[in-house]
Amino acid sequence: MADIAKAGTFTLGDRSVMRMGYGAMQLAGPGVFGPPKDREAALAVLREAVAAGVNHIDTSDFYGPHVTNRVIREALHPYPDDLVIVTKVGTFRGEDGSWVPAQTPADLARGVHDNLRNLGVDVLDVVNLRVGDSMRGPTEASIEERFTAVAELQQRGLIRHLGLSNVTAAQVAEAQRVAPVVCVQNHYNLVHRADDALIDMLAEQRIAYVPFFPLGGFNHIQSEALSGVAQRAGASPMQVALAWLLARAPNVLLIPGTSRLAHLHENLAAADLVLPEDVVSELSHIAQDQSE
Ligand SMILES: NC(=O)c1ccc[n+]([C@@H]2O[C@H](COP(=O)([O-])OP(=O)(O)OC[C@H]3O[C@@H](n4cnc5c(N)ncnc54)[C@H](OP(=O)(O)O)[C@@H]3O)[C@@H](O)[C@H]2O)c1
């Protein structure tokens, strides 16, 4: 089994977590809607991740909806003491699977209660307010009112720590005037580098940056340079993409998503892969080369 401790730890809120975590979105059915293709495999992936030392799992009650959280509960409840489950609110799902913004104070309270009930906990470890759309990216708009609404749920004792997702640097700063922010979850990977400055700014503040789509999400990262490095390292391109993220900054926490045990093992083993500095810098040029 991979030694994920080699990737190190980071403080998320008030708890130390392994930098190599797991994202549970892939456990719902196709289109993140409905039941898993293979429920037993979904349970096995979660149990295997925790057995390998993963203590940071990303989820949301709108995955399924409700499905992913219930699978997590079935697989892992009662939860290990060191497990930090990060969830998000701000969206509901339509009956056709559509993603519907749900950002009024009443929607956000309902989202928090959905997560509490389906995860089977009295308090949520970390809740991200998901502001923008994950495919189109964040847009500037004031988030003061909605972040104040989740901060009030935190003050009522339903949430330990707050985070943000699909946000700009200005929105992070605006939220920080309302309440402390312990993590930011945005779209970022080897070829999608819009958040480079934000990552560095958060690193200075010891705030976790959690890239979603670390492997490219629905469209895997493809690049000749990445394949070449992987071949030379005797690793897979996906492992190299994850190892590059680990090398990017100490506050980057990984949550690669998979519904398969074989991919889970492959991804966790990236924690063992140390890329020499010249290789990190070669890979860092991929985004630039692809945008030219
Ligand atoms: N805040 C947001 O708006 C937002 C948006 C998207 C995602 N997220 C979170 O971020 C997490 C990670 O993102 P993601 O799961 O969408 O994208 P990802 O981790 O970049 O990629 C997942 C995709 O890659 C496949 N895969 C995983 N490991 C692989 C491997 N070793 N080799 C080949 N294929 C592999 C998975 O399919 P298999 O199941 O077949 O392995 C799946 O199709 C999610 O699970 C979710 O928790 C958040």
Image (cartoon, grey):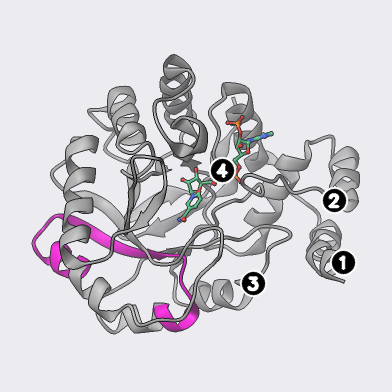
Residue type for callout 4:
Pro
Question: The disc labelled 2 sits on which kind of residue?
Answer: Ser
Q: Secondary structure under badge 4? A: loop
Residue 153 highlighted magenta (yes or no) = yes
What whole-number distance in Å separates the C-alpha atoms at marks 3 and 1? 15 Å
What are the residue bounds of the magenta stretch? 150-171
Specify whether tag 2 is near ligand 1 (CB below 8 Å): no
Discs 1, 2 touching: Cβ within 8 Å: yes
Alpha carbon separation for disc pair 3 and 4: 19 Å
Of the two numbered discs 1 and 2 on the same chain, state the one appearing first in sequence.
2
Instruction: Single out the residue that lies furthest toward the left.
Output: 156
Residue 221 lies, in percent from the top left, at: 74, 49
**Marks 1 and 4, how far apart at CA:** 24 Å
Which disc number belongs to residue 289? 1
27 up-or-down from 151: above or below: above
Residue 265 placement, left or right of 10: right
Kind of element beneath mark 3: loop
